[in-house]
Image (cartoon, helix red, strand yellow):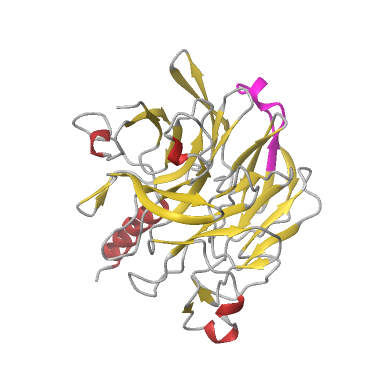
Amino acid sequence: MPITKILIRFMATCLLCYGLPAMADSKTGKLPLDKIKLPAGFSIEVWAEVPNARGLALGKNGTVFAGSMDEGNVYAIRDNGGEREVKTIARGLNLPIGVAFRDGALYASSVDRILRFDGIEEKLDQPGKPYVVTERFPNEKHHGGRYIGFGPDGLLYVAVGAPCNVCETEPEKFSLISRINPDGSNYEVFAYGIRNSVGFDWHPETKELWFTDNGRDWMGDNLPPDELNRAPKKGMHFGYPYCHSDDILDPKYGAKRDCRKLVSPAAKLPPHAGALGMRFYTGTMFPPQYRNSIFIAEHGSWNRRNKIGYRIEFAKIKNNKVIKQEVFAEGWLENEKNWGRPVDVLVMPDGALLVSDDFAGVIYRISYRKP
């Protein structure tokens, strides 16, 4: 095959894998939101146009912050009389997918660094240079986007993925979820054996950590599943790279550990669906059955022969167990072609659910009105 064709094919694959922004329908100038299927009473709209929108966080005064990956920017979105005003508050960062807010400050990840913008909501037009909280994280770009969030304990949790598809790594450095003080001190590993988590949240009542994890590639179209995990205490090991899910031995590393001694997932998610952002629903707009349960953004597969994901799943939680899983929103994928890729979800003060889409370059708003 000529080298030009190889390069074109490689570039097309990378575009699908990393989710560069897509253009809206050139004929209508709008995204085909009528294709999105939701339960009765729910509706979806474009809330804001944000290039390559990834992780989401909510400020004290209602500002929504969004990270990005390919753009390298961090954005702030404010509602101004029903119109959303989007401001770029940082440019040229290194994969700043993760954002978190605490005590008036915005924290943003940048592979090996965590940055902080103090008093950000009062100076969105001139945020100034950020303060470097820490530079202690690995600088490898493979799974280098760090999802971040503040826990109920006031500590900043930072996910660090494996620098590979599957490999043994330094257990205190990769394949984990860590936590630090807001000033960057007292680094410690909270959970081990995690290939790549790009979404976590804490149960509103039990305060326990739940997180998504992307399963490894190249074990076939249907193995292994992505995972939803629960970590009620520090120090638990969730299997990677030795065991995938709770019973699938890795072909290369599986003989080194006993899967029975590692933590099983709280729920198995569709294989290669790209389970990323997740949030417990704590609002009151949606019907009662959604409260204190989990919405999960599935970014979609990139190397599966038949695509899967590109949707939002719902996991019903009761007594710390997943008792039901169902598709909540779908339609971004049609006839093996996708026009959007959900990334993260965020519950707003009014109870609506925001969904970032790095492929379409927008943030959606899902709301409910009783039919």
Above or below, 81 against 197 in this view is above
Residue farthest to the front, as pictured: 319
- Is residue 18 found left or right of 263 in the rendered image? left
- Is residue 164 found left or right of 209 in the rendered image? left
Residue 289 in percent (x, y) is at 44, 40
- Is residue 25 found left or right of 59 in the rendered image? left
Residue farthest to the bottom, as pictured: 255
Query: Which residue occupies 45% across, 34% down?
Result: 353
Do we see residue 337 in this rendering?
yes
Residue 110 in percent (x, y) is at 62, 48
Query: Which residue occupies 77% across, 56% down?
Result: 187
The quadrant the N terminus occupies is: bottom left
Query: Which residue occupies 54% across, 45% down?
Result: 97
Determine the main secondary structure of the stretch shown in magenta: loop
The quadrant the C terminus occupies is: top left
As rendered, which of 254 and 110 lies closer to the eye? Answer: 254
In the rendered structure, does residue 361 fall within the stretch colored magenta?
no
As rendered, which of 214 and 4 lies closer to the eye? Answer: 214
As rendered, which of 251 and 283 lies closer to the eye? Answer: 283
Residue 311 in percent (x, y) is at 35, 48
Q: Which residues are magenta?
A: 115-129
Query: Which residue occupies 73% across, 46% down?
Result: 155
The mark tally for this picture is 0
Residue farthest to the right, as pictured: 186
Do we see residue 52 in this rendering?
no
Above or below, 263 against 75 in this view is below
Above or below, 128 against 139 in this view is above
In the rendered structure, does residue 124 fall within the stretch colored magenta?
yes
